[in-house]
Image (cartoon, helix red, strand yellow):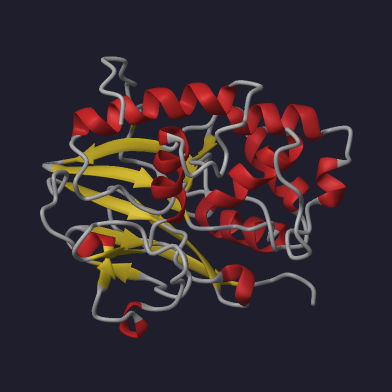
């Protein structure tokens, strides 16, 4: 990676927030979850862990709801959000399972894509002595805070631009950063490289790989990482990492975590077949 001195100031969030797992276009389920949250927290502040769109039946309504909530809602970018933006910019094509063609063809698409392009890849919060990193898939265990900041500076600039030639370009450092932050599950134990082809639960991984949050050394081990993305892992909670992807779009649940108290609220998938 180019050792540029450019760095990015990661936005700090208050600890009194709800972090919500992968929505994937499940609008009806999301509204039910928000109703439950609002019974205990009036006008809650929510951070979505990424993948607002894709696979589910109503990505457009999900984006409209989250983007129009008067600054109380924000989202981290996930791999499906990136794919949607890449399709909009003409460097990728929709897949049969995306269910986003109507969104991309709607009059609202330019404004919704513009809103997504202003979202972050990593947010931070702290409560007491615990610092949290909020990210869609994970943060590479070898990255220091400085390296993460430098990588984010380049990536955020690229996402906000009209030039998306970096997307899925294996020679691009920018894509390498995006790939790790939005798609990482397991790493090769010897080389610490991504195992992109593996999407199953950790107990099905072969002995040459391990979940990223179990790898050493961990340059950022002082932070607890809250993430989604890994539906086959499901709800997972340790001192080092917390996964909120409870497989809503696959018929599971949509989960929210109240960061300062550790309380969770879940609702079952409520989408029509």
Image quadrant in which you'd find residue 151: top left
The answer to whether residue 13 is visible is: yes
Give the left or right position of residue 86, taking residue 93 as reference.
left
- In the shown orientation, is residue 135 left or right of residue 74? left
With respect to residue 90, does 267 lie above or below?
Answer: below
Query: 26 and 204: which one is in front?
Result: 204
Could you tell me which residue is drawn at 12 percent across and 58 percent down?
216
For the image, the number of numbered tags is 0
Residue 51 showing in the rendered view: no
Query: In the image, residue 172 lies at what x, y percent?
Result: 46, 35
Q: Residue at x 59, y 43 (%)?
A: 82
- Which residue is at the front of the view, 181 or 226? 181
Outermost residue, top side: 5
| Residue 225 pos. (x, y %) | 28, 51
Q: Is residue 245 left or right of residue 85?
A: left
Residue 268 drawn at (x, y percent): 59, 74
Q: Nearer the viewer, residue 267 or 230?
A: 230
Q: Is 207 drawn above or below residue 33 in the view shown?
A: below
Viewport quadrant of the C terminus: bottom right
- Residue located 21% across and 66% down the image: 189
Q: Is residue 176 left or right of residue 129?
A: right
Q: Residue at x 30, y 31 (%)?
A: 1
Q: Which residue lies most toward the bottom here? A: 204
Residue 103: x percent and y percent? Answer: 82, 45
Question: Seen from this angle, which residue lies furthest front?
Answer: 171
């Amino acid at each position: 990676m180019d050792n540029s001195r450019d760095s990015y100031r990661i936005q700090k969030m208050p600890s009194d927030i709800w972090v919500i797992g992968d929505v994937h276009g499940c609008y009806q389920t999301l509204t039910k979850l928000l109703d439950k949250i609002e019974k205990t927290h009036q006008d809650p502040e929510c951070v979505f862990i990424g993948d607002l769109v894709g696979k589910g039946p109503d990505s457009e309504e999900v984006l409209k709801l989250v983007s129009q909530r008067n600054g109380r809602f924000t989202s981290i970018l996930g791999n499906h959000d990136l794919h949607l933006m890449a399709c909009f910019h003409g460097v990728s094509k929709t897949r049969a399972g995306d269910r986003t063609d109507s969104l991309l063809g709607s009059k609202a698409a330019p404004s919704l894509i513009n809103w997504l392009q202003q979202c972050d890849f990593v947010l931070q919060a702290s409560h007491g002595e615990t610092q949290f990193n909020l990210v869609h898939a994970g943060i590479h265990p070898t990255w220091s805070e400085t390296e993460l900041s430098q990588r984010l500076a380049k990536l955020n600039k690229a996402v906000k631009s009209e030039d998306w030639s970096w997307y899925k370009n294996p020679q691009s450092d920018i894509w390498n950063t995006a790939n790790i932050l939005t798609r990482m599950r397991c790493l090769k134990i010897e080389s610490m490289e991504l195992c992109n082809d593996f999407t199953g639960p950790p107990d099905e991984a072969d002995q040459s790989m391990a979940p990223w949050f179990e790898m050493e050394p961990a340059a950022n081990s002082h932070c607890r990482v809250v993430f989604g993305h890994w539906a086959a892992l499901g709800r997972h909670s340790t001192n080092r990492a917390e996964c909120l992807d409870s497989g809503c779009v696959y018929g599971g649940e949509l989960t929210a975590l109240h960061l300062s108290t550790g309380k969770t609220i879940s609702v079952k998938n409520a989408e029509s077949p």
